[in-house]
């Protein structure tokens, strides 16, 4: 059966919209799961130590980890932390330029931005809750 070009185009658009929604739902689920990962001072220092021992990248002029090494090393850092799949997702978010490696500067910047973003969201939610509360007179 041959579809007219317009119908074929609409079908493709609907398929892309569906796939986009599915990908968005998966990303939102992974975001929620990654937010549960607590990076306290001890974990932060252990993460730094992993990068101190990581191989030197001449291209980046600093120590760096590729995705497999990142996942392998950080599964041992977190006690009951993220799964290997979550760590891979985390790596890909940190590796914004898709170089295939991440440095300590990239990881620590990502963590600090995530932390500040979480605090900003909590503050916004608190303000929203307070503004929805009836005032006492």
Image (cartoon, helix red, strand yellow):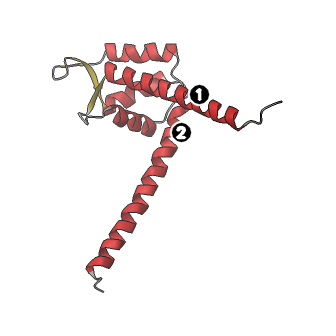
Q: Is residue 93 visible?
A: yes
Rendering coords of residue 130 (x, y %): 69, 32
In contact (CB < 8 Å): disc 2 and disc 1: no
Q: Residue furthest right?
A: 137
Circle 1 SS class: helix
Can you tell which quarter of the image residue 71 is in?
A: top left
Residue at the farthest left position? 58
Real-space CA distance between mark 2 and mark 1, rounded to the nearest whole angstrom: 18 Å
Residue 112, position in %: x, y? 43, 22
Residue 98's tag is none
Q: Is residue 98 left or right of residue 59?
A: right
Which residue: 40% across, 61% down?
A: 17
Crowd tier of the residue under label 2, counting other residues whose Cα lies within 10 Å: few below 14, some 14–19, many 20 or above: few
Which residue has dot 1 on it? 123
Residue drawn where x is 46% and y is 22% of the image: 77
Image quadrant where one finds the C terminus: top right
- How many C-alpha atoms fall within 10 Å of the one at disc 1: few (<14), some, or many (≥20)? few
Of residues 77 and 34, which is closer to you in this image? 34
Residue carrying label 2: 32
Residue at position x 33%, y 17% from top?
Answer: 51
Q: Nearer the viewer, mark 2 or mark 1?
A: 1
């Amino acid at each position: 059966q041959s579809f007219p070009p317009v119908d074929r185009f609409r079908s493709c658009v609907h398929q892309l919209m569906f796939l986009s929604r599915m990908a968005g739902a998966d990303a939102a689920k992974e975001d929620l799961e990654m937010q549960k990962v607590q990076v306290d001072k001890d974990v932060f220092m252990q993460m730094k130590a992993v990068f101190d021992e990581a191989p030197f990248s001449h291209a980046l002029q600093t120590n760096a980890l590729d995705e497999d090494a990142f996942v392998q090393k950080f599964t041992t850092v977190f006690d009951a932390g993220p799964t290997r799949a979550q760590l891979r997702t985390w790596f890909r978010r940190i590796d914004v330029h898709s170089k295939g490696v991440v440095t300590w500067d990239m990881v620590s910047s990502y963590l600090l931005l995530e932390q500040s973003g979480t605090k900003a969201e909590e503050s916004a939610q608190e303000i929203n809750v307070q503004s929805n509360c009836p005032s006492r007179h």
